[in-house]
Amino acid sequence: MGIFSIDQRLTVTTTIHDNPYDFDEAQLFDMALRINKKRQFLFVSKVLGKHLHVKPFVPLYTGFLLACRFLAQQYGQMHPAMNQFVTSLKENEPTVELETQRVAAPEKIAVIGFAETATALGHAFFNAFSANATYIHTTRERICERSASIAFEEEHSHATSHRLYAPVHFFDEATQIVLVDDEMSTGKTNLNIIAELTTRYPHITRYTVVSILDWRNEAERAAYEAFAEQHGITLHIVTLMAGEMAVEGAFYEEEVVPNPLDSHKSCTATIDEPLVEALALTSQSEDGSYCTQGYARETGRFGLTAEENVAFLQQLTVPTLPKHAKTLVIGTGECMFLPMMLAQMLDGDVYTQSTTRSPIFVDAHSVIYEKYRFNSPENAGVPNFLYSISKGQFDHMIVVVERVADPQGLASFVGQLPAPVTVVELTKGVSQYDDKPVYENEL
């Protein structure tokens, strides 16, 4: 049993009933307060690389370990490095080269990652396979030249609309669809998308939901069984830890966060050498504006095969970057996996993290103790946040953005960061910024 509380304002008690790798709860997550009336708290993952910075191998190993669990449960296939992944995550030390551990999936599977939090987790799961697997992730973005193959709503969310831009024949050969998310609370989001998928792709009758944590209660688990029977499908669950939670108290405080100073860092050098070949597509941001800068196909937003993924990662090279003692590589929104891979390739003391839409309450007693607010560089008009980065914590920061739809949003973000910044724009090139930060707590 675990008890999570922040200054005794709201307490969550957990009871774990499935823990196949004997993780301590504190190794996987902690609690924070959420600015959301539907659900006033969230478990902040310590292995996801989203809201908290981690060594880049941690989320990559976590996705691979979930793939090992999937292979063991579904096919009785034990991956030889499974125990090494577990030990490495517990001891926070990498011991395995991922590129030597990929295996062919036993059958043709289609993997779907959930935006925005699990785009990298889904890709890391998919990255465990060398063949017989395809990957795509849902997106919040509106693509003008393409119609979404499906759209669905997310429960308990601040941003509900998901779109899936699957190629016409993407699911044709799949015998199973695997959905990857970081956490199942009620599990309703998964049922929403599976309901759409079964209508659109009736030839697929086997589904697996993969997540790090599963908090569904008995009634919600029964709802899954009833749903599967109603839709004539089999529905499996794969997790690293499962249990139930009980919540006491309530959280009603309104957060007051100073507006960031309207200041910018000077761009001192630009190298126009894109890391990817951009897809010529236009997006409409949530503020109604349009962006004609193309997308990176390698993120998986428009579908990837295992062979394409392996080939791209083999030829991926890190651009020439300044060397520093301690570096943070920051992904932006849905663009998380490639920043993690770039971070993994860098020498030195390197960490990774991502910006997020999720509005979390900042509290000195919480793992979320600092907040930077700015508009999303990739989807104009959407407030974004970066959490728990303190002044002096890093010597250098590398912001990796897929494409820039809002240059002012990017400038505001870069201007606040408390260290020299390099911006790697995947579809354009690299920019260096000076070391005169604006730090919001000094305002």
Image (cartoon, rainbow, N blue to C red):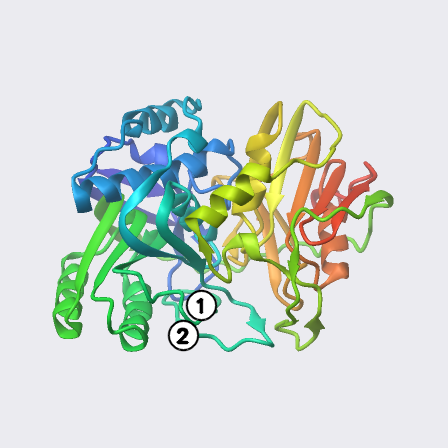
Along the line of sight, which residue is nearer the eye, 211 or 169? 169
Along the line of sight, which residue is nearer the eye, 293 or 334? 293
| Residue 175 in sight in this render | yes
User: Which of the 4 quarters of the picture holds residue 239?
Assistant: top left
Residue type at mark 2? Ile
Q: Residue at x 60, y 48 (%)?
A: 386
Percent position of residue 358, x then y:
51, 57
Residue 166 image label: 1
Q: Residue at x 66, y 58 (%)?
A: 278
Q: Is residue 309 left or right of residue 8?
A: right
- Cα distance, mark 2 to mark 1? 8 Å
Secondary-structure class at tag 1? loop
Q: Residue at x 70, y 43 (%)?
A: 441
CB atoms at circles 2 and 1 under 8 Å apart?
A: yes
Residue 9 lies, with reference to residue 406, above or below; the image says above
Along the line of sight, which residue is nearer the eye, 365 or 25? 25
User: Which of the 4 quarters of the picture holds residue 20?
Assistant: top left
Q: Quadrant of the N terminus?
A: top left
Pointer 2 residue: 150
Residue 389 lies, with reference to residue 358, above or below; the image says above
